[in-house]
């Protein structure tokens, strides 16, 4: 390999993508005709798929030695799959892209140009997305809150298509944080970065496995991992509730002594108790989310378990 040649590793998490794989692999392989003076390595991580994704990846590997296949023992989630893939990369820089081709692999050419200029993190940020109104609303709300209360300056449209330097890869692998958002973690590291806006395309083949429960978990993980806002919100509500309760008590006492209000009955008391108990239960739930993650980290279980590797 000449001094001017670089090596690009591309990590692709795979979960029920048998319809996309026959199209995704050729698109990635075609990058050698677009990006010159570059050697490629394709790291596919099978995240416990129960369809034909794994067998199709193995067939592709027999045809192309640049392909690595990492098979996880079960489904651990896309973030854990990306963590596993990063560990097995050897490139000077590493790209991360989904297997469903909603993100154009050809953008890696522009990303590498920015990387060569010294940017250690190159983010393809979503300027818009060809998705339903409900999906757009959920995503826009999530990224707005994330930027507002957790990570200042976070791209409004979010990102999960990016290129990072080997140094950044090593740092992410070393951190080994569980129940986190890898994308937010990469942004949090704070290295020199550049953002390239693009329009995320509609998924053409297959059904997305990005369910509502997974979205909610990512939402909670992101805020618990990168923000104290939920705890501060609890403190704020506690103080406000205490002040209002005190003022209401003073009002009732003065009103009763003055005779312009009558003593309230059980209905008011029960309503107040129910309201306060509801606030307490919400607060306990928030505290529980933090405590569960502390417990999960203290167990020192791995974020993923690799069943087999084919390099």
Image: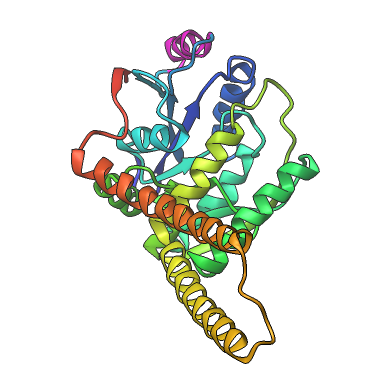
Q: Position of residue 4 (x, y in %)?
A: 39, 49
Q: Count the marks: how many?
A: 0
Q: Residue at x 51, y 70 (%)?
A: 152
Query: Which quarter shows the C terminus?
Result: top left
Residue 126 pos. (x, y %): 66, 52
**Between 114 and 137, which is closer to the camera in this rendering?**
137
Q: Residue at x 23, y 34 (%)?
A: 301
Camera sees residue 172: yes
Which percent across, then down, holds residue 272? 56, 63
Q: Residue furthest bottom?
A: 258
Overall secondary structure of the magenta section: helix
Protein image colouring: rainbow
* Left or right: where 2 falls relative to 241: left
Q: Quadrant of the N terminus?
A: top left
80 is higher (above) or lower (below) than 63: below
Q: Could one spot residue 155 in this view of the protein? A: no
Which residue is found at the position 65% from the left and 49% from the top?
139
Quarter of the figure with residue 287: bottom left
Along the line of sight, the residue nearer the viewer: 299 or 147: 299
Q: Residue furthest left?
A: 299
**Please, is residue 125 above or below residue 55 in the view?**
below
Is residue 248 placed above or below 5 in the rendered structure?
A: below
Q: Quadrant of residue 264?
A: bottom right
Span colored in magenta: 52-64
Magenta stretch containing residue 185, yes or no? no
Which residue lies most toward the right here?
133
Q: Which is more toward the observer, 27 or 154? A: 154
- Horizontally, is 174 left or right of 248 in the view? left
* Location of residue 297 in the rendering, given as x and y in whole percent from the top left corner: 25, 44
> Does 182 appear above or below 254?
above
Is 153 displayed left or right of 8 in the figure? right
């Amino acid at each position: 390999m000449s001094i001017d040649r670089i090596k690009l590793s591309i990590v692709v998490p795979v979960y029920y993508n048998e319809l996309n794989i026959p199209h995704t692999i050729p698109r990635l392989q075609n990058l050698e005709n677009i990006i010159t003076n570059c050697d490629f390595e394709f790291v596919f991580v099978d995240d416990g798929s129960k369809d034909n994704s794994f067998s199709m990846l193995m067939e592709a590997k027999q045809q192309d030695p640049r392909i690595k296949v990492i098979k996880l023992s079960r489904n651990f989630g896309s973030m854990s799959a990306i963590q596993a893939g990063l560990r097995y990369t050897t490139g000077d820089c590493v790209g991360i892209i989904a297997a469903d081709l909603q993100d154009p692999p050809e953008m890696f050419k522009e990303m590498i140009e920015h990387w060569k200029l010294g940017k250690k993190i190159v983010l393809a940020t979503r300027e818009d997305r060809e998705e339903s109104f409900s999906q757009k609303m959920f995503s826009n709300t999530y990224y707005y809150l994330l930027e507002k209360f957790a990570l200042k300056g976070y791209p409004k449209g979010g990102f999960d298509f990016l290129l990072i330097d080997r140094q950044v890869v090593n740092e992410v692998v070393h951190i080994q944080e569980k129940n986190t958002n890898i994308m937010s973690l990469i942004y949090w590291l704070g290295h020199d970065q550049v953002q390239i806006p693009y329009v995320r395309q509609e998924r053409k083949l297959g059904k997305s496995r990005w369910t509502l429960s997974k979205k909610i978990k990512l939402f909670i993980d992101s805020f618990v991992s990168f923000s104290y806002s939920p705890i501060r919100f609890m403190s704020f509500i506690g103080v406000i509730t205490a002040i209002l309760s005190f003022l209401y008590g003073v009002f009732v006492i003065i009103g009763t002594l003055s005779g312009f209000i009558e003593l309230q009955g059980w209905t008011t008391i029960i309503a107040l108790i129910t309201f306060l108990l509801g606030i307490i239960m919400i607060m306990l739930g928030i505290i529980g989310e933090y405590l569960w993650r502390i417990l999960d980290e203290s167990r020192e279980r791995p974020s993923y378990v690799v069943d087999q590797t084919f390099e």
